Amino acid sequence: MVQVTLIAAVLVLFMRLGTEGGPWSDLWQTQPWSVAAIINGGLLAIGLGFAVAAMRAGRRIDRGQRGAILRLDRWATTARLAAGILFGAGVALLGWLDLVRAGIGDWILLDELAALMPLLGLLVLVWWAIAPIERRVREAVILRRLDEGLPPPVVVSRWRHVLDQARHEAGPILIPLIPMLAWGEAVVRLEANPPAWLENMAGQELVRAEATYVVALLAGMAAVFACAPLLIRAAWSTTPIGASEIRTRIDDMCRRHRVRVRGVLMWRTRSTSPNAMVMGVLPSLRYILLSDLLLDALPARAVEAVAAHEVAHVRRRHIPWLVASVMTTVLVLIGGLELAASASFGAGPYPEWFEGAVAVLSLVLVLAVISWISKRFEWQADAFAAQHLSGFESRGGAGPAPCISHDAAATMAGALLHVATLAGMDPERSTWRHGSIRTRVERLRRLVGTPCDEAPIDAAVRRLKFAVVVLLVVALVGVAWLPGPSRADLGGAPAGSP
């Protein structure tokens, strides 16, 4: 939920670039202290409420009520969700960003970061409040880890816990999104007031064309996204995995499936997180990360299964298709809302409440699409791991494709359950992007005996991708030909205009 909250917050800020006001645009001007109290007071109340819940959960845990840990985890999710909704409403509806700009000026990125600080403070407060619970959990598993021959988790100070959470949970989201936000604001500024030197160098017609800035915006964001792995690696504690059985298995797997990576890294989490990930869209900037606890706790074949799951995200091109899905959703939404607005309000300008509703609806729909598609990509990656362990190679080999074996499906399912146990995760609990472990395990078990090239989830994802392509073409044609209001009518006048 930390990722959802931060993505939503940055998206809301991005949608307010170059615009002013909201449905109650005069409120932040006539009652600035009320708006500040609603945002900051509301976030503080959420944080303090969770801190009280954490203290009560700690007392229950000391009395042996282990279920309090799961209840507190649900409370943490609720607190972060409520904070994200409050922050989004404050920016999109109440003009919180405009109030910050009025106080410190409309600087590139500085005012957005200042507006984001109360939400980041809430996340820090939640991590601070939950740190004693995490400490109890780590202390409780030390003996069990030693009995199992695993390294015990390192018991860290409260501030170290907060720093680790910020690096590992918030870092992967903010490291690429903050530079993207800065680049987006710079492009909006140039479009609103192009300097004379730029017009002289590139030509006034080119500089005045809206398509120029769309291309510049997308190109800059793509460059930031491509370089994000280097930034994330610098922020985290990682080290290359040298010659070993695991490294040999992963190198062979990448060769079999024609996936190029720059390196395979061990992600040092002080033996607290059983996790793995692949990051990078360019082969020269792509890494596979396996956490220290994952490498220590899982047998080599299970680690290979987890790594195959991550390789699947590259091999099946999940990230580009997820981006295309989000773009399609936004374009379809824009087209549909322009039709509805033209029928209701004429050529514009549109009422401020409608603009606020569009912003909220866009955000909710984008997050829902990301969640729905990501879960299916996770199911396909699980199936890919089982296919790999069954001897299947991408682009085929000699003879018919093998069937998914019971051992392969059981190995991947066992790895998922083992990771859930190490992480203290309820297998029945569904997360925003990954769904529930129980559902993923059941889907793996149903794959046993299925030919590797006939997995149902592969066919479902192919249909999904086809639908995305069709909708994207229709949306692009529709947006290009649909008569509608100007950009200023849709998003408000550029900052500083009358």
Image (cartoon, grey):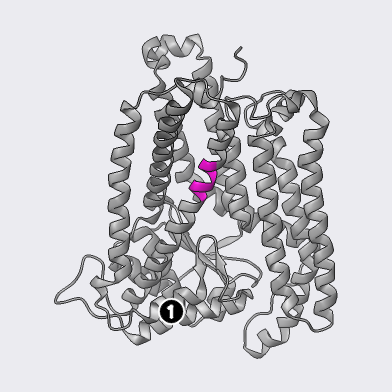
In the depicted structure, whether residue 350 falls above or below residue 172: above
The number of callouts visible is 1
Q: Name the residue at 54% across, 44% down.
A: 363
Q: Amino acid at mark 1?
A: Glu
| Viewport quadrant of the N terminus | bottom right
Residue range corresponding to the magenta coloring: 361-367
x and y percent of residue 7 in the render?
Answer: 57, 47
x and y percent of residue 150 in the render?
Answer: 62, 83
* Label 1 CA crowd tier, 10 Å (few <14, some 14–19, many 20+): few
Furthest residue in direction bottom, as rendered: 147
In the depicted structure, whether residue 337 falls above or below residue 397: above
Furthest residue in direction left, as rendered: 399
Q: In the image, is 248 to the left or to the right of 131?
A: left
Q: Nearer the viewer, residue 373 or 300?
A: 373
Provide the secondary structure element on which disc 1 rests.
helix
Q: Is residue 244 visible?
A: no
Q: Name the residue at 59% across, 41% down.
A: 10
Q: Name the residue at 26% across, 74% down.
A: 452
In the depicted structure, whether residue 413 falls above or below residue 101: below
Q: Nearer the viewer, residue 332 or 109?
A: 332
x and y percent of residue 89 in the render?
Answer: 66, 40
Q: Is residue 91 visible?
A: yes
Q: Main secondary structure of the magenta part?
A: helix
In the depicted structure, whether residue 35 falls above or below residue 41: above
Is residue 468 covered in magenta?
Answer: no
| Viewport quadrant of the C terminus | top right
x and y percent of residue 164 in the render?
Answer: 69, 60
Q: Name the residue at 54% across, 80% down.
A: 418
**Which residue was labeled with disc 1?**
442
Q: Nearer the viewer, residue 148 or 485?
A: 485
